[in-house]
Amino acid sequence: MSNDLNQECVVGLDAGGTRTRAVFAAAEDGRVFGEGAAGPGNALTVPVPRLTDHLVEAIAQAVPEAARARVVAVAGGFAGATAASTEEPGHVNARTALTAALRRLGIPADRVRICSDIEAAFASAPGTPADGLALVAGTGAVALRITDRRSTATVDGDGWLLGDDGSGFWIGRSAVRAALRMADRRGTATALAVSVGRALGVPDDALPGDGDWSRGHREAYRMHVLPAVMAELPIRLARFAPLVVEAAGEKDAVAEGILDEAADQLTATVRALNPAHGERIVATGGLLGPEGPLTVALTARLRTLGLTLDWVPDGCRGAVALARLAHDGDDR
Amino acid sequence: MSNDLNQECVVGLDAGGTRTRAVFAAAEDGRVFGEGAAGPGNALTVPVPRLTDHLVEAIAQAVPEAARARVVAVAGGFAGATAASTEEPGHVNARTALTAALRRLGIPADRVRICSDIEAAFASAPGTPADGLALVAGTGAVALRITDRRSTATVDGDGWLLGDDGSGFWIGRSAVRAALRMADRRGTATALAVSVGRALGVPDDALPGDGDWSRGHREAYRMHVLPAVMAELPIRLARFAPLVVEAAGEKDAVAEGILDEAADQLTATVRALNPAHGERIVATGGLLGPEGPLTVALTARLRTLGLTLDWVPDGCRGAVALARLAHDGDDR
């Protein structure tokens, strides 16, 4: 380890809405020496002083004090920032916070590179591609065209109120809607009415049972579910997405329909980027990982567009690769 | 007038999310002597002391001081309350506030009747019906079965996050979604992109023009629209509904599709109440009035279910009718 630390090193950061992660690696080959993590790192929603603190905390964990003078480049993928514009507030905040954090830690890196968390995730794919398509399908949903390592076109990512069609939020909201529509007789019977009701603490006797679901119990169900959902942040609806996956696994037709529709929506989102046959698409987010509930359905649909999907867990590996490229003088 | 005030009188109240209205009328024939208005009257969201103040203000305007001793019955239709349950928080709040308001004004009414604003609107229809269907299609959307003047089954009314399908909110959100989907090329061209963009202050050069809408301008449009919408309360999306009506009037296919879909949704909401052929349906809300954008489309769809639609502007007339019935000893 002490020999390793005599060589030139880089730091890659993945700063998202939930936490900030730092990876410390060799500049020459990207071998990982250390990792660290701290609180949220969204460059638009976390105030700069707190963002700075989180960066300091994560980097300090990853990089031993004795090695800090050897860091030659740092790259950070931040939610709320993009490499495509150095003047937008998210980019400015991220650069300000990262510069301050490095100064506080005595890290002299001349080369600091800011991009979005999705641009970093795209660069995490094998071969560190510079051009192609990126798709995020987690709590939210967005697809990007990446050109020269920068996002150049965006589809969806419109947020829970206006879009994120096919996302975990969208699936979770669909689950509660299906339950309410069964309760008021607009929709067909679904196991989601029981599982969503249980998750929201509806008393057992107001849940649909084996026999008829009486009018009074239906009204009681609605009167319990509606205020329980509205008392929380809308984005919390994403937590019901696993209930849809579970019900679909048991062949509940309504749940299967929701997942099919989600895969269709995400396919339409990718298609709007007008992909060329054989283009690379790098995906991230829990719906599409090795255990992701939409992986099989979406892979099949994208194959008909001539696209194959590479999944990456996050932007850490890409951020390290971008820092190494910056050190080599490649600032694309 | 002085002779009129020597007879027995009643007060009807329509207390909604925006304002509280009071109507002072003859107990014998419902002839109106005076009206008053004050701030919001939702029994679940306006704290009881403030609700009491609003009731006092509206009633004091409607009922001259000299006539107050002659009031024999009061009925109020409150958003957030229902006649069907005297124990729910909204009903309890409404009764507490109204009782306190009457005491403060020296109104001795023995007979006080609380119902929902929708139950009062239903009673506003010609003949003061006791049974049938009620439909609200304004900012929100809900359909009720009314039995013996009380709501006995509810369809939708699930609020902006989970439902209100086909409502003014739903139409307004659809307008912004259509604009964003044109901007990211998921959707077809629509005049809504210009009208929604203008309403949100998008700079002229980022709006779609006669020629090609460039990639950069599309991205700038999205980056302006998304934070502008998220900076306001979600329910404010309802203000874009008139833009859809306007665009549909000029034969914009996307706007026409939104209004058609809204009429379909409201029809499905009514159909879930399992209406009998020839049953009465009383509607209220701005989408269905004499100038309402969905009046023609919905009337045609309901006709195929054997239903005819009576529209009433609000619950004031019904609240007066319910107060008169209470005075006659009919407390159904």
Image: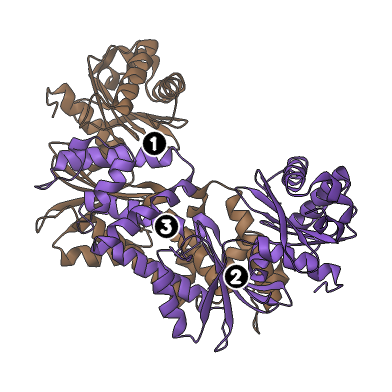
Chain colours: A brown, B purple
Marks 3 and 1 close (CB-CB < 8 Å)? no
Question: Residue at coordinates 57% horizontally, 77% vertically from top-left?
Answer: B281
Query: Residue B294, how many percent across, how many down?
Result: 41, 67
> In front: mark 3 or mark 2?
3
Q: Percent position (x, y) of residue A172?
A: 47, 59
Residue that numbered label 2 is attached to: A194
Q: Amino acid at mark 3?
A: Trp
Foreground of the two, B180 or B304: B304
Residue B47 in view of the camera: yes
Disc 2 is attached to a residue of which chain? A
Residue at image position (13%, 55%) is A275
Q: Quadrant of the N terminus of chain B?
A: bottom right
Residue A135 shows in this picture: no
Query: Which type of secondary structure does the marked residue at label 3 adopt?
Result: helix
- The type of residue carrying mark 1 is Gly
Q: In the structure shown, which secondary structural element does the residue marked by tag 2 occupy?
A: helix
Q: Mark 1 = which residue?
A: A16
Q: Is residue B328 above or below residue B243?
A: below
Alpha carbon separation for disc pair 1 and 2: 34 Å
Name the N-terminal-most of marks 3 and 2: 3
Residue A188 is labelled as none
Q: What's under tag 2, amino acid-wise?
A: Val
Q: Is residue B244 above or below residue B142?
A: above
Give how far across and how far down residue A53 sits, in percent. 45, 20
Q: Nearer the viewer, residue B98 or A223?
A: B98
| Tag 1 secondary structure | loop
| Residue with the mark numbered 3 | A170
> Reading the chain from its start, which is encountered first: label 1 or label 2?
1
